[in-house]
Amino acid sequence: MAFKVTEVFGYSVEDNSPEAIASRTEKKCPFQPAGTRCTKVKKSEPLGVCMFGDSHLGTPVCPVRFNQKDKIFVDVAKAAFGSGRKIAVRPELRILRKENGKKAGKVDYIIAALDEQGKPTDFCALEVQAVYVSGNSYYPMFREFLATGIPPREQRGMDWLSSRKRLIYQLNLKVPVFRRWGKKFFVAVDKQFFNALPTMRRVTDIENSEVTWVVYDFKRRDEGARFSISPPEFYCTEWNDVEVALREGAPPSKQDILEDVYAAMKRKKSPILPIEI
């Protein structure tokens, strides 16, 4: 599936309002605290592409895009702790310690529930996975858009496989730690990426979930409007099922291995030969 650049610095590429033009000029990120500049790729010349998609549907290529009005943190906290609580969000916390004393395994967000005195009493983890784009750098089309204001027409494929590889590597590092602690682990993705993942067995409810997927879509609900994040869909899974599903490819049967070896012994060109031991 091929998509075009659809959102830059928080505004649709079809939006020529004064607010959208100011955002492109100032290179601000509207999904971070007010006045924060985009720092994607590099601070001096940020690659301010938030999403690829079409006129009405977007897929985030930047994880910060999920932070629209802190909705993602509220959604996850309500699912983890219930309503009527105060929370604190701690970004980029490293949870593993290497032999040299340095820490690794950086979790995107720790969401802590606070007591009446404002002290943390419980916590959960939130990992956010955006999607990689196939092909060469899309800096050229991004720069051309900023210079001309003409929406990019070049299409790119979404690299679902590389995105999946990145995600399973991160989850392999972190989920076992939170699983051992008995703490909930959430993974936020957009619906198109989630639909591209292998099927995972769904468990009944969040209390029995070891990896809870928080699935959003991003759409323009009205012509001329900005893209907005949908209410979440929670998909509850067990870690073992996730680990097997996200592994690249399904393993063969033992009989498949034996038949492959025998076929290699019988082939006419460069057969493998038996060895006496």
Image (tube, rainbow, N blue to C red):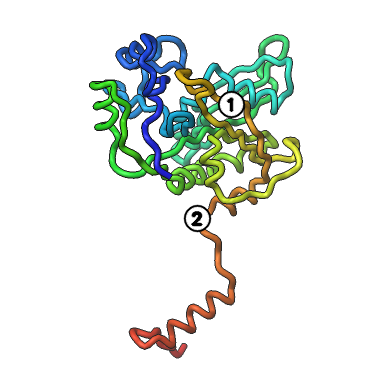
Which is nearer the eye, 157 or 85?
A: 157
As drawn, which residue projects farthest toward the front?
Answer: 223
Query: In the image, is residue 77 above or below residue 129?
Result: above
Q: Position of residue 72 (x, y in %)?
A: 58, 24
Amino acid of disc 1: Ser
Which is nearer the eye, 145 or 275?
A: 145
As drawn, which residue projects farthest toward the bottom?
Answer: 276
Q: Position of residue 91 (x, y in %)?
A: 51, 24
Tell me what residue is drawn at x 72 percent, y 10 percent. 116
Tell me what residue is drawn at x 43 percent, y 34 percent. 53
For label 1, the crowd category at 10 Å Cα-Cα, with few meaning under 14, some 14 to 19 and many 20 or more, is few
Image marks 1 and 2: residues in contact by CB distance under 8 Å: no
Query: In the image, is residue 43 above or below residue 4?
Result: above
Q: Regarding mark 2 in the picture, which secondary structure is present there? A: loop
Amino acid of disc 2: Glu
The residue to which callout 2 is attached is: 248
Q: Position of residue 261 (x, y in %)?
A: 48, 80
Q: Give the spatial CA distance, label 1 vs label 2.
A: 30 Å
Q: Nearer the viewer, mark 1 or mark 2?
A: 1
Specify which label sits upstream in the sequence, 1 or 2.
1
Tell me what residue is drawn at x 38 percent, y 85 percent. 271
In the image, is 135 to the left or to the right of 61?
A: left
Q: Quadrant of residue 210?
A: top right
In the image, is 220 to the left or to the right of 119?
A: left
Tell me what residue is drawn at x 34 percent, y 85 percent. 269
In the image, is 154 to the left or to the right of 116?
A: left
The residue to which callout 1 is attached is: 230
Residue 242's label in the rendered image is none
Q: Regarding mark 1 in the picture, which secondary structure is present there? A: loop
Q: Position of residue 43 (x, y in %)?
A: 31, 22
In the image, is 245 to the left or to the right of 23?
A: right
